């Protein structure tokens, strides 16, 4: 393990061990302070966040983009402060901190014996939403986590999410898809963050007027298992409560090849994601390149 890896692991360890002991108002203030400092430094992550917002809000002035990126960093640090504190939250605190509309799409699907896939973008706090599912709805689920470096950091994230009641599978290794399919055929729940995929297997979609690539996994799982595919959007407001909506199911097209069907379904997911992001852009925590035109200038930009 390199010195940088050890430092990264130690910082996350301090977060989980220290921040959760702070009074909640103090943790919120700390998050805003860190966010503002990072925003003022205008590192690569902040610049990328701002350029992504420029695609979401194309008519925004430079002043408006600066406001959005500052709000976006505050939202991002709110996610981290909440995540560091989640292991110490009581079931009552989790329930009080989340309000999800149209959860009947999820509960009715599971009650009918069908597997359900919840697909969501990097909006607000997806870990808190997962904790709400396992704690308030008392529904266990399976998810996938990207292998992080160092390995000890990945192990921390797995232990953290398993502590919230999630079954966590590694993204790499090739076995995750089969396990997810088995869980769905057994009538279980799978939750996947699905707004960014840079692999060769990703599906190209139109997203805010330009081409991006999103994972085909949610659509392919729905095709193969008959599970419901439900988009989810989340957002913060000025209260301590995170809000969200479980949208109606994305249908499997009646015609076309499997690849063509997956493309149509993934585009439908992207359209729902875009609506939620446009309504609450500051809560979309996308500090990486997403659009193909940003990854490869030769592909062009609109």
Image (tube, rainbow, N blue to C red):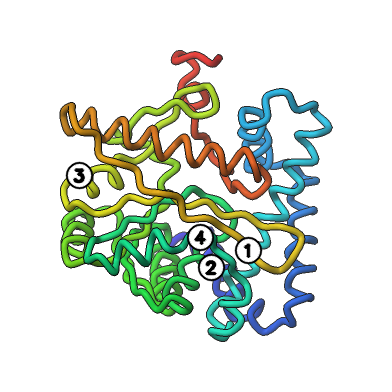
The residue indicated by pointer 1 is 242
Q: CA distance from mark 4 to mark 2?
A: 5 Å
Foreground: 197 or 237?
A: 237
Marks 1 and 4 sit apart, C-alpha to C-alpha, by 10 Å
Give the CA separation, mark 3 to mark 1.
Answer: 31 Å
Q: Does label 3 or label 1 sit earlier along the sequence?
A: 3
Residue 138 placement: quadrant: bottom left
What residue lies at 56% left-to-right and 54% top-to-bottom? 234
- The residue identified by callout 3 is 223
Task: Measure the C-alpha gap from mark 2 to mark 3.
Answer: 28 Å
Number of numbered discs overlaid on the protein picture: 4
CB atoms of marks 2 and 1 within 8 Å: yes
Label 2 and label 1: CA atoms lie apart by: 8 Å
Question: Residue 291 versus residue 150: which sits nearer the camera?
Answer: 291
Closer to us: mark 1 or mark 4?
A: 1
The answer to which of marks 2 and 3 sits earlier in the sequence is 2
């Amino acid at each position: 393990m390199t010195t940088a890896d050890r430092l990264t692991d130690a910082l996350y360890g301090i977060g989980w061990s220290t921040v959760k002991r702070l009074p909640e108002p103090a943790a919120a203030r700390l998050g805003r302070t860190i966010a503002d400092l990072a925003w003022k430094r205008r590192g690569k992550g902040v610049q990328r966040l701002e350029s992504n917002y420029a695609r979401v809000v194309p008519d925004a002035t430079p002043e408006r983009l600066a406001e959005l990126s500052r709000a976006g960093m505050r939202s991002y640090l709110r996610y981290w402060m909440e995540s560091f504190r989640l292991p110490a939250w009581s079931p009552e605190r989790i329930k009080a901190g989340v309000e999800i509309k149209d959860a009947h799409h999820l509960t009715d699907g599971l009650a009918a014996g069908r597997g359900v896939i919840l697909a969501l973008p990097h909006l607000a706090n997806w870990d808190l939403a997962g904790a709400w599912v396992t704690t308030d709805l008392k529904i266990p689920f399976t998810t996938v986590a990207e292998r992080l470096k160092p390995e000890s950091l990945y192990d921390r994230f797995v232990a953290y999410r398993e502590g919230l009641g999630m079954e966590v599978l590694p993204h790499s290794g090739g076995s995750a898809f089969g396990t997810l399919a088995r869980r769905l055929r057994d009538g279980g729940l799978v939750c996947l963050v699905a707004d960014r995929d840079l692999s060769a297997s990703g599906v190209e979609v139109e997203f805010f007027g330009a081409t991006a690539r999103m994972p085909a996994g949610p659509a392919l799982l729905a095709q193969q298992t008959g599970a419901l595919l439900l988009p989810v959007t989340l957002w913060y407001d000025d209260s301590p409560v995170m809000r969200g909506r479980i949208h109606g199911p994305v249908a499997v097209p009646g015609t076309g090849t499997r690849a063509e069907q997956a493309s149509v379904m993934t585009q439908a997911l992207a359209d729902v994601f875009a609506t939620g992001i446009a309504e609450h852009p500051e809560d979309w925590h996308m500090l990486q390149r997403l659009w193909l035109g940003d990854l490869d200038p030769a592909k062009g930009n609109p």
